[in-house]
Image: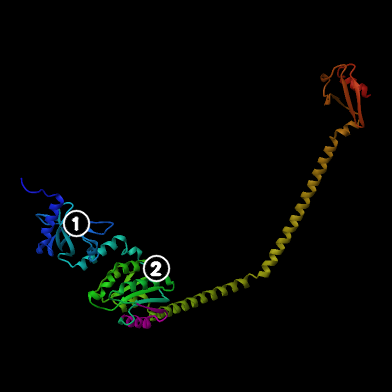
Amino acid sequence: MTGAALTVTQLNAYVKSIVESDGKLKDLLIRGEISSFHRHFRTGHLFFSLKDAGASIKVVMFQSYANRLAFSPEDGMSVIVRGAVSVFERDGVYQLYAKDILPEGVGARQLALEQLKRKLAAEGLFDAGRKKPLPPFPQHIALITSKSGAAVKDVLGVLARRYNLCTVSLIPVSVQGEAACPSIVRALRYVSIAGRYDACILTRGGGSQEDLWVFNREEIARAIADCPVPVISAVGHEIDFTIADLAADLRAPTPSAAAELVAPDSGEIARQLNGASLRMETALHRLYTRKKEALYQLQLRHRACSPAQLLGERGEGLAALRHRLQTACTKRLDKLEADWRSAADLCESLNPAKVLSRGYAIAQKDGAAVHSVMQIQPGDRLSLRFCDGEADCTVDQIGEEPSHADQKESEL
């Protein structure tokens, strides 16, 4: 083994210089399928592998190139990558440094459109449940379009013919080119915060797919979805369909059709009002006839049963009832008074003071009434209460209850 040994760094640097010196590897197109796709969250660089049935190669796309892509690469997508081959010295890995990626079989712009549709649909921006209904009789309509386009004349002409009862405010914008997207977004935001519009028409006339492409921008779709005012999208002709149409509350095939959808036909309204007026007049005539007949029947009943006569009869009955009530009240009061006097006499006859006035006395021992000789004994001191005072005495002896004969003899 002869010669000086190389370091790994020297070897990798040498291999890199050889690879980069090959002109065929500086700008080449590689076809393959994307796998292990990853976008670095901080730098924005793209990392993935490009493979076919027999091999794979690592691919790096720096943020400056990635920001120019019109679509988002995904795993499983067949693409053609343009770039240069070089060596990543640290790991000794050769890889493809991409400058552009083209989807194979479909245009990058169309692919980006389909990806945006799926993204917004997944967020619910196209759901029928979030669509706002149009007002039946708008008073103020915002018209967002180019002030020089044919769409202005179409919309104003239809509204003047069908429904000239509302105010139409033109909000001029660019409808194609680089300035179109921010111009339309500003107009939609103005309509959102102005607070004076009932409906909004976003429109432009026909044109090529390139001319109408601005209405496929995500910013416009989100501005439409965020607008609290119902938005009608009428972009191009009937065959043209954009993301703005999907995000709008209602899609019209043409600007003229948008004007017909946003406002009713005043002629038809007048015919409906005339019909309603005729039906109301007929209903009022029928009601008048019924009420007139009912009044006639009431007059007949009035003559057959005079209110004065009814009042007289009811007055006599009322007088009789009044007399009966007075009589019943008098009898009841008399009875109550008699019962009261009887009760008063009974209470007077049972008055203990009146009994004492007839010569009786109440004997008390220790403050309690004596009811029987069994409660006292000789020597007890008693208090005798008479009708006109009290006297104290001492029991000398206790005798037996006198017989009936003794009572009669004593009474005699």
Question: Disc 1 and disc 2: Cα gap in Å?
Answer: 42 Å
Q: Please state the horizontal and vertical placement of residue 47, each as a whole percent of the image.
A: 21, 57
Circle 1 packing at 10 Å, graded few (<14), some (14-19), many (20+), is many
In which image quadrant can residue 94 be found?
bottom left
The residue labelled by disc 2 is: 228
Does the segment drawn in magenta span residue 154? Answer: yes
Circle 2 packing at 10 Å, graded few (<14), some (14-19), many (20+), is some
In which image quadrant can residue 36 be found?
bottom left
Q: Nearer the viewer, residue 77 or 39?
A: 39
Q: Depth-wise, is mark 1 or mark 2 nearer the camera?
A: 1
In the image, which residues are magenta?
151-172
At horizontal 73% and vertical 59% (from top left) the residue drawn is 320
In which image quadrant can residue 85 be found?
bottom left
The residue labelled by disc 1 is: 48
Mark 2: which amino acid? Pro
Q: Nearer the viewer, residue 64 or 125?
A: 64
Mark closest to the chain's N terminus, 1 or 2: 1
Q: Please state the horizontal and vertical placement of residue 67, each as a whole percent of the image.
A: 25, 64
Point out the residue furthest to the left here.
1
At horizontal 41% and vertical 73% (from top left) the residue drawn is 198
At horizontal 91% and vertical 24% (from top left) the residue drawn is 392
Q: Nearer the viewer, residue 251 or 120?
A: 120
Residue 17's disc number: none
Left/right placement of residue 3 relative to residue 48 reads: left
Q: Nearer the viewer, residue 347 or 209?
A: 209
Left/right placement of residue 380 relative to residue 309 reads: right
Mark 1: which amino acid? Phe
Indicate the quadrant containing the N terminus: top left, top right, bottom left or bottom right: top left
Does the segment drawn in magenta span residue 28? Answer: no
Callout 2: SS: loop
Q: How many marks?
A: 2
Left/right placement of residue 27 relative to residue 237 reads: left
